[in-house]
Amino acid sequence: MTKHLLTTQEAADYLGVSKQFLERDRYVGARIPYIQVGARAIRYRLQDLNEYLDSQLKTSTTEV
């Protein structure tokens, strides 16, 4: 089964955030999992992005 890898820009578009948001996330500790391909290429798996979104689900504004 081939897994499609998204570029940083594609992942940002999918999540509705800026490319800089994902770059900053990687710099400070990567809450959103990513794959480094070679020396510089960063890719995201769609499954990881969906799992991250699921983990951010809140039911109240008082939740931390």
Image: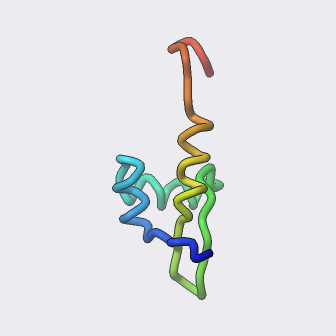
- Residue 8 in the figure: left or right of residue 57: left
Going 57% across and 34% down the picture, which residue do you hit?
Answer: 56
Identify the residue at image location x=55%, y=29%: 57
What residue is at 38 percent from the left and 59 percent from the top? 19
Quarter of the figure with the C terminus? top right
Q: Quadrant of residue 7?
A: bottom left
Classify 43 as above or below 32: below
**Which colouring convention does the figure follow?**
rainbow
In the foreground, 4 or 57 = 4
Vertical placement of 14 versus 64: above or below? below
Name the spot of residue 48 as percent of width and height, x first. 60, 55
Q: In the rendered image of this protein, does residue 35 appear above or below residue 18? A: below
Outermost residue to the front: 1
Residue 21 vs residue 9, the one in the foreground: 9
Rendered view: 17 above or below 8: above
Q: Is residue 7 left or right of residue 28?
A: left
Give the image location of residue 20, x and y in percent.
39, 58
- Within the image, what quadrant is residue 55 found in? top right
Using residue 53 as the reference point, say whether residue 9 is left or right of it.
Answer: left
Tell me which corner region of the image, top left, top right, bottom left or bottom right, holds residue 13.
Answer: bottom left
Tell me the quarter of the image containing the N terminus: bottom right
| Residue 40, position as x, y percentages in the image | 53, 83
**Which residue corresponds to the image point at 35% horizontal and 53% vertical from the top-left?**
18
> How many circles with numbers are drawn on the protein?
0
